[in-house]
Image (cartoon, rainbow, N blue to C red):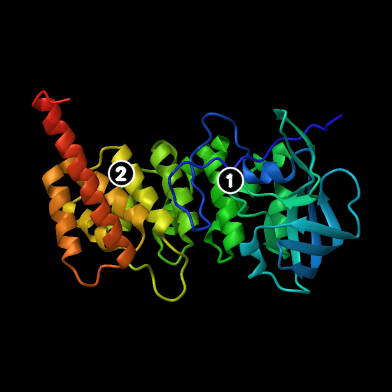
Amino acid sequence: MPFSFTRCTSCVSLAIAVGVSMLNIQPARAEHVEAPVELLYAPGNMLVAGTVIEINPSGRLVFERKDVLGGKGRPPEKIDVRVPKRVLDSTRLGERYIVGYSLARADARDPTRVVANPGGAVLLSSIGLDPAMFNENSATRELLKAGRTEHGRESRHFFDLLMKALAGGERSLQMLAAGEIALEPELGERLQESGHELIEKIARDANTSPDVRALLLQSASERPSEFGEWWQAASTDVVTTTPVDGYAGGTSDPTGLILLALEVLDKHAVTVAPDALERWLGSSRTPLVERACLMLRRESPALERSAINAALADSRLPDPTRKFLNDHLRRLDLMDSRVKARKGGVN
C-alpha cells in the first residue's frame, strides 16, 4: 500500500519567468501549498545533516549521513539524492549540508496518493525551498529546530529567527524565511506588530536575491494590511530603476522580479509611466518585452506601435529582441486587418 505523504507542489503563478531559478509565486489558491518548514517535517519526508562525498554530473549528490533531524526511520549511511543540475555548481565536496528529501512521488493513477519513487531520493523543491539544501551551521539548525512542531512555528522565537534569517546574507535561509512569511498566514499578526520596516528594506535592496525580493513583493501586494502599503512604490521602483541589462557584479538575473513587479502593478490597475515601459523594449529578455508591449497597448495601441518603432530604430537592439518586435508588429497588423474587415462586413 502506498504510504501517506503531503505532496510538495511548486505552485507559482507569476510568469516569473523562467530561466531564472525563480519561482512563479502565487499564494496557493487551487490547492494548499505547505509553508517550507512545515514541508520539511511533513510525513514521508526526511531531513538530515551530512557531508557531500560524491557529485555526479548527471544530477545526483551522495551524502554521508551524520544526523537525522526529521522524518521516520533510519536513512542509510550513504544517501544518494537526485538534485537539480544547477545545484551541482555551488556544491563542494567535503562540505556539510542539511538537506530535505523525499522517497515518494505522485501516483500516476491517482494524483491524490503517492508511491515509492523508483528513481530514489529526490531533493524537495517548493516555495521557499529552492531547493531544500542549506549550509550546515548553527543558525540553520536553530531555525529548523524551532520550527519542528506546529507550536514552535507559532512562537515568537521562531518569528524572530525568521526575521534574523531574512536580514542575513545566506540566500538559502533568506529564501526559506521569505517562503515561510509568504505561505504562513498566522504570521500576519506578528508582521503587523513588527517586521514591516525590515521586510520592506529587504524587498527594496538591490543586493538581495531577486527571487527573495519577488516573494516578499508578491506577498505584500496580496496582503497589504499585514505587510504595509509599500508594495506599490517598491514595484514602481523595480520597473523604473532596475538596469535593463541587469545588475553588474554577478547579481542574479532580475527578470523574474521585474515581471512580477509589472504583473502586480497591472493587476491592481496602477498606472505606469509610458517611458518606464518603453525602456524594457530594449531588453534582451523577450518575456519582459512582451509584457511591456501589452501594458503599452492598454494605454494606447498607437503608443505601443510608436515605442516598438523607436526600439527597432536603435542599432544596439539585441537581435532576438529585434526579431521578436518585427514578428510582433506583423501580428498587430494582422489583428488590425481582421478588425477592419469585420467592421466593413467582410468575412
- Residue type marked 1: Glu
- Name the mark on residue 265: 2
Q: Secondary structure at mark 1?
A: helix
Which amino acid type is shown beneath numbered disc 2? Leu
Q: Name the N-terminal-most of marks 2 and 1.
A: 1
Which of the labelled discs sits on residue 27, or is there none? none
Query: In this image, 104 relative to 143: left or right?
Result: right
Spatial CA distance of label 2 from label 1 is 24 Å
Q: Could you tell me which residue is drawn at 49 percent across and 57 percent down?
A: 19
Q: Callout 2: few (<14), some (14-19), or many (20+) C-alpha neighbours within 10 Å?
A: many
Q: Determine contact: label 2, label 1, CB under 8 Å.
A: no
Return the x and y of residue 281 as percentages of the image width and height.
25, 58
Location of the C terminus by quadrant is top left
How far across and down, in percent of the image, does residue 217 sit?
42, 48
The residue lying furthest to the top in this view is 345
Q: Residue furthest front?
A: 347
Could you tell me which quadrant the N terminus lies in? top right
Mark 1 neighbour class, 10 Å CA radius: few under 14, some 14 to 19, many 20 or more? many
Q: How many marks?
A: 2
Q: Residue at x 14, y 26 (%)?
A: 342
Q: Residue at x 36, y 53 (%)?
A: 287
Question: Where, by quadrant of the figure, is residue 112 drawn?
Answer: top right
Q: Quadrant of residue 55?
A: bottom right
Q: Which of 171 and 8 lies nearest the eye of the viewer?
A: 8
> Which residue is identified by label 1?
180
